[in-house]
């Protein structure tokens, strides 16, 4: 079998494909034939070395967080899965594991049955990006009908799912994206769209109850003019500077406005919700599909440009 590894930190050129044996399972594991792996920003943060304080310096390391595939073997412990099941999930510890291989072993708790109406590529594409969307609008806050929501950076993977999750509650969604992304955000259900190249989001003549900041460019301080006295401002942990983070957290202590930097792993309950949403018509757009042999090109390209929805690596 083939798998992708790296033996040193660097750009996409450090990635290499090696031949190795199919891994053996132990009692509490399942062997998965991987069919697709999604490309995520954390992947290149890891192989570049920017997260080495967390990932450590032991090489070789693997790549890939989310995957979909087919159950090939099952250990001796009881499980609801059976051989031949089509599943999707994520590795337990992205700092030490990777999914970009022909076969991987995984604990069943990190797997969910793939809906029959979506492809392997779509299943893996929705996993990591669906998690923050669901956590933001269904767990961090309970989004209500009629609330005005701004999603800044709405045409990427998280925005794609977040628009649709927000519309499930009949919130009023304004999506900010590039010109290229406008038609997609409308298709995903946005009530209003803003082209950030033509309009300054900070100068919109609107106030929002909830702001989901995904672009890494709009800070809590900058958004002052478009917030109500009770606005909840949600961003992804790691976006923005430490100064922005501290300002937001301290401001929240002395105001009814709330600032939430969010970490959102794709838990079992979130994957189950995503599966149900997919069964009911969740739209999952994949802009680019690569093969494993194109792994260097894939990461080099995706790091440099904004894409609509997601990009995935599909196994033959």
Image (tube, rainbow, N blue to C red):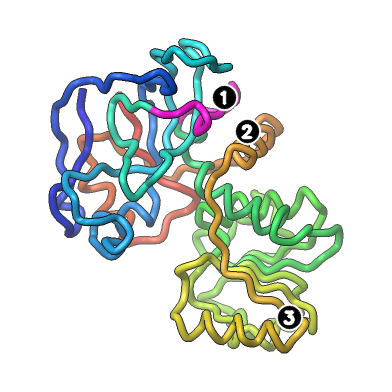
Residue 153, image x, y percentages: 54, 65
Establish if 101 lies above or below 303: above
The answer to which image quadrant residue 70 occupies is top left
| Magenta highlight on residue 108 | yes
The answer to which image quadrant residue 74 occupies is top left
Q: CA distance from mark 1 to mark 3?
A: 39 Å
Rendered-image quadrant of the C terminus: top left
N-terminal-most mark, 1 or 3 = 1
Label 3: few (<14), some (14–19) or many (≥20) C-alpha neighbours in 10 Å: many
| Magenta highlight on residue 116 | yes
Residue found 39% across the figure and 43% down from its top: 65
- For the residues bearing labels 2 and 1, Cβ distance under 8 angstroms: yes
**Residue under circle 2?**
275
**Residue under circle 1?**
113
Classify residue 194 as left or right of residue 216.
right
Residue 166, image x, y percentages: 73, 55
Residue 252, image x, y percentages: 68, 82
**Residue under circle 3?**
257
- For the residues bearing labels 2 and 3, Cβ distance under 8 angstroms: no
Rendered-image quadrant of the N terminus: top left
**Which secondary structure lies at badge 1?**
strand
Establish if 260 lies above or below 284: below
The magenta segment: 106-120
């Amino acid at each position: 079998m083939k798998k992708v590894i790296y033996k040193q930190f660097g750009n996409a050129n450090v990635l290499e494909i090696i031949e190795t044996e199919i891994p053996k399972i132990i009692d509490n594991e399942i062997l998965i034939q991987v069919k697709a792996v999604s490309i995520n920003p954390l992947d290149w943060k890891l192989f570049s070395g920017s997260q080495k304080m967390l990932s450590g310096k032991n090489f070789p390391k693997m790549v890939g967080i989310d995957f979909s595939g087919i159950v090939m073997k099952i250990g001796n412990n009881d499980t609801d899965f059976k051989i031949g099941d089509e599943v999707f999930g994520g590795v337990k510890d992205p700092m030490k594991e990777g999914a970009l291989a022909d076969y991987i072993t995984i604990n069943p708790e990190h797997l969910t049955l793939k809906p029959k109406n979506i492809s392997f590529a779509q299943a893996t594409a929705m996993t990591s990006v669906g998690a923050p969307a669901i956590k933001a609008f269904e767990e961090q806050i309970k989004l209500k009908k009629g609330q005005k929501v701004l999603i800044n950076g709405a045409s990427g993977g998280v925005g794609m799912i977040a628009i649709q999750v927000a519309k499930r509650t009949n919130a009023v969604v304004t999506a900010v994206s590039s010109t290229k992304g406008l038609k997609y955000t409308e298709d995903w259900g946005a009530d209003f769209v803003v082209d950030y190249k033509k309009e300054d989001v900070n100068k919109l003549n609107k106030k929002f109850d909830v702001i989901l900041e995904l672009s890494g460019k709009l800070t809590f301080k900058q958004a002052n003019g478009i917030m109500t006295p009770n606005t909840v401002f949600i961003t992804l942990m790691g976006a923005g500077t430490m100064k922005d983070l501290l300002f937001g957290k301290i401001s929240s202590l002395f105001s009814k406005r709330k600032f939430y930097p969010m970490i959102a792993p794709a838990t079992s309950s979130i994957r189950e919700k995503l599966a149900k949403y997919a069964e009911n018509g969740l739209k999952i757009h994949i802009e680019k599909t690569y093969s494993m042999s194109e792994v260097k090109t894939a990461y080099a390209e995706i790091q440099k440009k904004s894409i609509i929805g997601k990009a995935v690596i599909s196994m033959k």
